[in-house]
Amino acid sequence: MIRTSQRSKLALGILAAAMAVPAVSQAALVEDSKASLELRNMYLNRDFRDETTGTPANPRSYGELWGQGFIAKFESGYTDGVVGVGVDALGLVGVKLDSGAGRRDGNMMALETDGAPVDNSSQLGLTAKARISKSTLHVGTLQPLLPVVLYNNTRLLPGTYTGGLITSQEVTGLTLHAARLTEYSLRDSTDREDFEDSTATLTDKIDHFDLAGGSYAFNPQLTASYYYGRYDTQYKQHFGGLVHKLPLGDGISLTSDLRYFQTDYDAPGAAKLDDNKFVNGMFTLAVGAHKFGAGFQNMSGDGVLGLIAGADPYSTNLSTYWTFNREDEDAWQVRYDYDFASLGVPGLAFMTRYVSGYNIEQPSGSGQNDGKEWERDTDIVYTLQDGSLKGLRFHLRNVTYRSGGVAAVNARDVDENRVIVSYTLPLL
């Protein structure tokens, strides 16, 4: 299904206006254009290891899906002049290769009325853009990678948002953003939807999400950031972050990544929640080809970290299967990475991590904070470094997730495997 929003029509209008200007003004519009096609083949299986057959919403004991994704991107240049204009396009096509209603788990494709993944799906997103000096405006389909809104790109096709985004880099080292988002499209959907009530009361729709903030690099080793997000009538959110890389010698460094969120809920009526505070961080020691990481988090207040629909939490504990974002959840993480280039195999990389969450709040009124969960991830990635298929990427992911005393959605014990083969073909 292809659905074109009013902003997509605006993008077409701006492109038509650009084509109407003199040819000399269009030179950069064409010469600076880029286009690519990513071929993403993904297989995912989930073997639920709990003693039940699931819940009414998720009754299956095994899930399996294999699909082929096509992600086409076009980015035009800008017309010459004080104000340059252009247009970008994003085309998404997903094709089911194997699955069925009885094994549909994985959130990779939209579902038919009988619960089976659709045979194929498609979506077109257009984005109008304008540039003045070192500042740009994008209106239409967006894929923001910001602390208060982080789009998902972990399945066959990525999620998207609809709205307007201003990015300014007029001052060296300083990057500023301001945006309004009005719709979203999930990674397993072809529709653009309005935002829903973040408190799950589903009593009304949300009109928009606003954000403003930026980051400043004091030097190549130290960057600080602050962002503010306003989810219409639902919550206000502040984020502060600090990333520092400390050189310790030849091939040795220590990177500190600290993040803090404060979410102030103001949803009306019974859905009112207290403020939520979320502190997390990661310390990574790099020694040659090795990286040793240790992370932590502390969640306090009612509810969870505020998130708009379709977004992933900007957390160092965001893992392959789970987010470790439950009420009052504390967590720790250990991680190890290795780059096989040091052994003469460039393009081969290994990662493993273990995340443990605990002190999870049980259902309201229980007075218990004894819920716990853990996840172990292992990734092996190999990317061809030369030849006609240079850039061809093979990615194997293995996941083990277990929980205890967690009465919540997505708390079933599971073993999971993913195989991802991707290749990006430059077209322009």
Image (cartoon, rainbow, N blue to C red):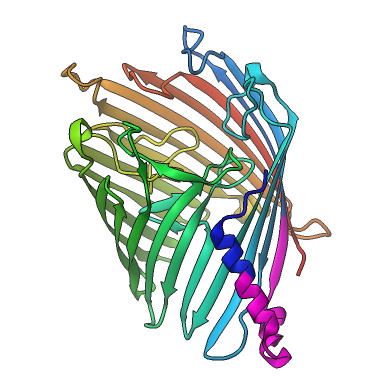
Please say whether residue 301 is visible from this viewpoint.
Answer: no
Please, is residue 12 above or below residue 239 in the view?
below
Residue 33 magenta-drawn?
Answer: yes
Q: Can you say which quadrant of the picture contains the N terminus?
A: top right
* Residue situated in front as seen by the camera: 339 or 110: 110
Q: Which residues are magenta?
A: 13-37
Tell whether 119 sits left or right of 402.
Answer: right
Q: Which residue is located at x 54 percent, y 22 percent?
A: 415
Q: Quadrant of the C terminus?
A: bottom right
Q: How many marks?
A: 0
Query: Is residue 182 highlighted in magenta?
Result: no
Relative side of 106 to 40, left or right:
left
**Percent coordinates x, y for residue 243 in the rendering:** 33, 61
Q: Nearer the viewer, residue 221 or 158?
A: 158
Residue 273 seen: yes
Foreground pick, 292 / 211: 211
What kind of secondary structure does the magenta stretch mostly adopt?
A: helix
> Picture quarter containing residue 361?
top left
Residue 163 vertical placement versus 362 (above, below): below
List x then y, in percent, for residue 103. 64, 19
Q: Quadrant of residue 326?
A: top left
Q: Is residue 115 left or right of residue 308?
A: right
Q: Is residue 318 above or below residue 286?
A: above
At 30% from the left and 51% from the top, the residue drawn is 232
The residue lying at 43 percent from left, 72 percent from top is 167
Q: Give the image location of residue 207, x and y in percent.
A: 37, 50
Task: Determine the image quadrant of residue 304.
Answer: top left
Q: Is 277 on the left or on the right of 80, as rendered?
A: left
Pick whichever, 299 or 162, lies toward us: 162
Question: Which residue appears at 27% of the width and 32% of the height?
Answer: 329
- Residue 302 picture location, percent across and down: 20, 34
The answer to whether 216 is drawn above or below residue 126 in the figure is below
